[in-house]
Image (spheres, helix red, strand yellow):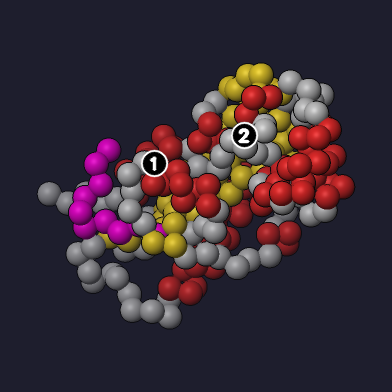
Amino acid sequence: MGLHADVKIILGSSSQTRRAIMKEMGLEFEILTADIDESSIRREKPEDLVMALAEAKAQAILARLATKESDADSAQQTLLITADQVVVHEGNILEKPRTSEEARRFIEGYSRSPARTVGAVLVTNLSTGVSKGGVDTAEIYFHSIPEHVITTLIEEGSVFWAAGGLLVEHPLVSPLVNAMVGTIDSVMGLPKELTLSLIDEAVERTK
């Protein structure tokens, strides 16, 4: 997929990881973040939850952009990318841990059984109103996670910004990954292949 020069991208995320993945894909983008109460949005199925959250983030950003000059008459198409992710473990949906105790419980559990990440990506064409979304999953199997690793992760604090406190890219954690079904970028919150495909679908091609 090759993006046209007349396409502008806005990443609706405060995640440093998602920004890094976007850069790895060679995409230029601006940042706008959504300030929503994620805890007020609940769904039984993880796939429904992450998509509902991605949609809510998009709507919040769209409301902010509505106060600015519209790009509707511009030759440049503007795409807004929003995303969300949860971890499913032993039948439970895990979001960002709120306390040290919760983070410890989440991470200790990954020594017992695999964690599954469920992530949604939504691409909204602000110029045409077209919206394309999809869900990607991955499964991670861990070796036993030592107590000192868990303590260090909690003390560093980055686990509180990750769904399920899951940080497979962390240098202390990556050697403990036994197997992974899916892609590392999906586990980290922005599956490249899905994102590029949705961008391609959302762009209005002109001859």
Crowdedness near tag 1: few (<14), some (14–19) or many (≥20) residues, C-alpha within 10 Å = few
Residue appearing at x 50%, y 48% in the figure: 18
Residue underneath mark 1: 24
Residue 127 included in the magenta stretch of the image? no
Residue 9 included in the magenta stretch of the image? yes
Residue 27: image location, x then y, percent: 33, 48
Image-quadrant location for residue 80: bottom left
Crowdedness near tag 2: few (<14), some (14–19) or many (≥20) residues, C-alpha within 10 Å = few
Residue 91: image location, x then y, percent: 79, 33
Residue 177: image location, x then y, percent: 65, 24
- The residues bearing labels 2 and 1 have C-alpha atoms spaced at a distance of 19 Å
Residue underneath mark 2: 171
| Residue type of the residue flagged with mark 1 | Glu
Q: Are marks 2 and 1 in contact (CB under 8 Å)?
A: no
Magenta span: 1-10
- Is residue 126 shown left or right of residue 185? left
